[in-house]
Image (spheres, grey):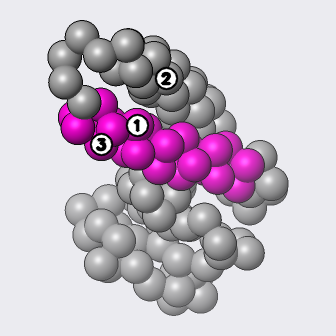
Amino acid sequence: MANKTLPLVKRVVADIVAAHDHALDVQAKVERLRDGAAELQTLQKDLDGTLDRLQTFVDELTEIGCELKDYQTGLIDFVARHQGRDVYLCWKLGEDKIAYWHELSAGVAGRKPVATLDER
């Protein structure tokens, strides 16, 4: 099921990574400017709009059933049931399919190939 949502998830996550990068760039410019500069107001509006779009993208992922874990790499988890317990199916931008999973408490460092899920 999770792999079926990947075409939409890929687009949304790519938008998240791009918006996050843009927000970081604008935030750095805002911090370099003096208060009251005309450019500061324009940059702040740009930053606010970007952050609003970013939240909309994250909300869209949540509606699909994903949890965003990393804005920069586009790492997401899908909650799945395996042998009566919840696990995360793990995917990040650039991967062709969901090929990894981990326990809820393990995090990305605990990623294992989905082939290791015991199908009893």
Amino acid tagged 2:
Asp
Up the image or down, 56 lies above or below 80; here it is above
From the viewer's side, name the closer residue of 49 and 101.
49
Q: Residue at x 57, y 49 (%)?
A: 18
User: In what element is the residue under mark 3?
Assistant: helix
Q: Residue at x 65, y 72 (%)?
A: 94
Residue 17 lies in magenta, yes or no? yes
Residue 119 lies in magenta, yes or no? no
From the viewer's side, name the closer residue of 75 and 85.
75
Q: Is residue 13 visible?
A: yes
User: In what element is the residue under mark 1?
Assistant: helix
The reply to whether the C-beta atoms of the residues labelled 3 and 2 are less than 8 Å apart is: no
The reply to whether the C-beta atoms of the residues labelled 3 and 1 are less than 8 Å apart is: yes
Please provide percent x and percent y for residue 85.
40, 58
* Residue at numbered disc 2: 46
On screen, residue 19 versus residue 40, left or right, reads right
* Residue at numbered disc 3: 28
Q: Which residues are magenta?
A: 10-32
Q: Residue at x 45, y 17 (%)?
A: 42
On screen, residue 8 versus residue 75, left or right, reads right
Please provide percent x and percent y for residue 72.
43, 58
* Residue at numbered disc 1: 26
Q: If you read the primary sequence from the N terminus, does the residue marked by circle 1 or circle 2 appear first?
A: 1
Crowding near the residue tagged with mark 2, few <14, some 14–19, many ≥20 C-alpha atoms within 10 Å: some
For the stretch drawn in magenta, the main secondary structure is: helix
Q: Residue at x 49, y 23 (%)?
A: 46
On screen, residue 106 versus residue 108, left or right, reads left
Up the image or down, 37 lies above or below 80; here it is above
Q: CA distance from mark 1 to mark 2?
A: 7 Å
